Amino acid sequence: MLALLRLLGIGFVVLTVIYAALSLWSRRVRRRKLEAEWDEAQGPGGRAAFVEAGLAEYDQSLRRKLILGVYVVPLCLIGLIVYLTNFH
Amino acid sequence: MRYVKWSIIVLFWALVAAFLHYTLPQHDIARISDTYEKRIDPGENSLFWSNAATGETLNVTGRDVFFIQTRLNDDDVMVYRNEDTGWGWPPYFKFDTANLQAEAADLRSTAAAPQWVVIRHYGWRNEFLSVYPNVVSLRPVDGPDVRIIPWLNIILLTLLVAVVWALYVRWRRFRQARIDPVLDDMGDNLDEAGGRLKGFFRRKG
């Protein structure tokens, strides 16, 4: 059982680092796109308010929740490998 | 200096290649001649023995390990070990060692009436270190000449190259944008400082 806990522990730490890096990067990309969009159209409203509203929308979006796949995909992969190796 | 640099680079890539060659699965086509079980006390070669915590205690020096004796389709003999990898490295998550040994024993055959099997394994055979590759799975096949396409290795190596390339490109871009200008700046400052210093000495002399 200890070996499983160790795998999950190390995996959680590594994946959390990846999750944090991806989240920050994705938000920055979103911010840049919003700023470019506003610069092109010069509106609507103020630049900072436009960007903030866009980011608030992003925070609710499915795209952001998809980053949780960083945790989900490896877990599914482990399950699949366990099944294929031992029970197939 | 150039030889040192290239030695380090070559050594690094040789280590990466060896690691992948040891860890990734490979397929052999073989005929199982017998199976046996032997007590093993891993010593200097303990790196090449799996020490999976799958329920049993780890506080023992030796344990019994399953082996599978085969003759490959190129007529060489090959002996595999059959060990759990458990939740450890490499991540095959193999727990069915005893079942696999039962399958292997069931597929034994003689040279006169061969039953060929595909043996999926990882690891190396080394006689000097008493190291054996570890069987991951077995399946019977019709003949010794079946064609096996290593899809998993193709996909994994492609993904690995893609990830390394993506990181490398980003790092290079980051260096060009952020670090090189700073270094150039420092170089300019040094040049200027050197000029001033030279002027200083010239004035003195």
Image: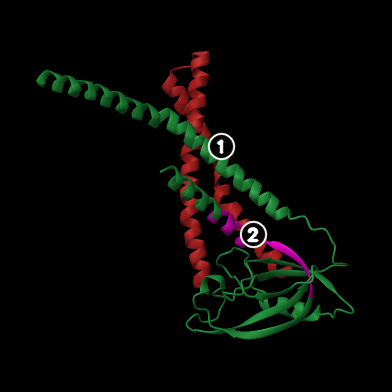
Q: Position of residue B59 (x, y in %)?
A: 47, 82
Of helix, strand and loop, which one carries label 1? Answer: loop
Q: Are marks 1 and 2 in contact (CB under 8 Å)?
A: no
Chain ID for label 2? B
Question: In the image, is B176 to the left or to the right of B155?
Answer: left
Residue at image mark 1 = A61
* Location of the C terminus of chain A (image quadrant): bottom right
Residue at image mark 2 = B24
Q: Residues within 10 Å of mark 1 (few under 14, many from 20)?
A: few
User: What segment is highlighted magenta in the picture?
Assistant: B15-31
Question: In the image, is B122 to the left or to the right of B88?
Answer: right
Q: Is residue B173 or residue A31 the one in the foreground? A: B173
Q: Was residue B17 drawn as part of the magenta stretch in this picture?
A: yes
Q: Position of residue A72 (x, y in %)?
A: 59, 53
Judge whether B171 appears above or below A50 on screen. below
Question: In the image, is B102 to the left or to the right of B183?
Answer: right
Of helix, strand and loop, which one carries label 2? Answer: loop
* Colour green maps to chain: B
Q: CA distance from mark 1 to mark 2?
A: 38 Å
Could you tell me how many numbered marks the image carries?
Answer: 2
Q: Amino acid at mark 1?
A: Ser
Residue that appears at 22% across and 24% down: B193
Residue that appears at 58% across and 39% down: A62
Q: Amino acid at mark 2?
A: Leu
What is the drawing colour of chain A?
red
Residue that appears at 64% across and 50% down: B157
Q: Residues within 10 Å of mark 2 (few under 14, many from 20)?
A: some
Q: Was residue B185 drawn as part of the magenta stretch in this picture?
A: no
Q: Position of residue B21 (x, y in %)?
A: 62, 59
